Image (spheres, rainbow, N blue to C red):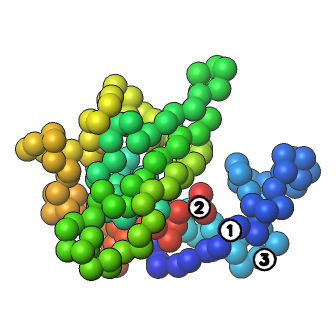
């Protein structure tokens, strides 16, 4: 992913199911962008993200999806617990959406908390739809309560270490042709899928 910010709120404010059907919008929860360049940017980002996911080892794909779909920082993502994820299913048992409850204070280290380096919003909820919701729901399945979604390989009570994740993520991003894409850059992709 090339660091890019795409503001998709305009399409979301025009959204109704009737307009989506009339437009035959290819997006699940957005109308077709009115600005042609935005549509091109979304398509290019989608291809880049899919390449990154394909190159990411299966055990780390849910973490990449959480970062890209919810806008989590790495510390917030690896601090997520099973009870921070609410899976909403339809009558047929299919995943409708997933709610990710993010506590930005929990994932911060003590020095950030003391200096106030990061925003002080204590918590937020992000709705995730489509394939991303399916991946997150599949990952949380079988976990319960305060179980970590992304635990350390050595100690399930500790978060996955950045060095362990980045060793695999760095290989994946290079294989996908995105050598300069940091985990943090996935935050800029949130809301565009």
Q: Quadrant of the N terminus?
A: bottom left
Distance in Å between CA atoms under marks 1 and 2: 7 Å
Give the mark count.
Answer: 3
- List the single residue furthest toward the front: 114
Q: Does 40 sit above or below residue 161?
A: below
Mark toward the start of the polypeptide (3 vs 2): 3
In the rendered image, which residue does mark 2 sit on? 191
Residue at x 41%, y 42% (from the top left corner) = 84
Q: Please tell me whether mark 3 or mark 2 is closer to you in this view.
A: 2
Residue at x 39%, y 55% (from the top left corner) = 103
Neighbor class of circle 1 (other Cα within 10 Å; few <14, some 14-19, many 20+) is some
Neighbor class of circle 2 (other Cα within 10 Å; few <14, some 14-19, many 20+) is some
Q: Does 185 sit above or below residue 23?
A: below
- Judged left or right of residue 6, residue 28 is right
Mark toward the start of the polypeptide (1 vs 2): 1
Neighbor class of circle 3 (other Cα within 10 Å; few <14, some 14-19, many 20+) is few
Residue 42's image quarter? Answer: bottom right
Question: Which residue is more in the foreground, 39 or 149?
Answer: 149
Find numbered disc 3 in the image and state the secondary structure of the residue it sits on.
loop
Residue 81: x and y, percent?
A: 33, 42
Residue at x 53%, y 41% (from the top left corner) = 98
Question: Which residue is more in the foreground, 90 or 115?
Answer: 115
Question: Which residue is more in the foreground, 110 or 42?
Answer: 110
Residue 121: x and y, percent?
A: 45, 65
Mark toward the start of the polypeptide (3 vs 1): 1
Residue 35 disc label: 3
In the rendered image, which residue does mark 1 sit on? 8
Residue 73: x and y, percent?
A: 37, 64
Residue at x 27%, y 79% (from the top left corner) = 115
- Judged left or right of residue 131, residue 1 is left
Find numbered disc 1 in the image and state the secondary structure of the residue it sits on.
loop
- Is there a contact, CB below 8 Å, between mark 1 and mark 2? yes
């Amino acid at each position: 992913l090339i660091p890019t910010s795409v503001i998709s709120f305009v399409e979301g404010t025009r959204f109704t199911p009737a307009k989506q059907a009339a437009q035959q919008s290819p997006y699940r929860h957005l109308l077709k962008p009115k600005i042609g360049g935005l549509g091109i940017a979304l398509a290019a980002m989608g291809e880049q993200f899919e390449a990154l996911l394909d190159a990411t080892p299966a055990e780390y794909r849910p973490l990449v999806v959480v970062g890209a779909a919810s806008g989590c920082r790495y510390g917030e993502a690896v601090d997520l617990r099973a009870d921070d994820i609410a899976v909403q299913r339809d009558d047929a048992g299919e995943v409708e959406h997933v709610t990710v409850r993010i506590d930005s204070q929990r994932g911060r280290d003590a020095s950030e908390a003391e200096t106030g380096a990061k925003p002080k919003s204590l918590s937020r909820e992000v709705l995730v739809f489509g394939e991303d919701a399916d991946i997150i729901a599949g990952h949380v399945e079988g976990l319960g309560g305060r179980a970590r979604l992304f635990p350390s390989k050595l100690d399930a009570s500790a978060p996955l270490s950045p060095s362990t994740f980045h060793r695999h993520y760095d290989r994946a991003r290079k294989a996908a042709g995105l050598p300069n894409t940091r985990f943090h850059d996935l935050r800029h992709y949130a809301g565009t899928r």
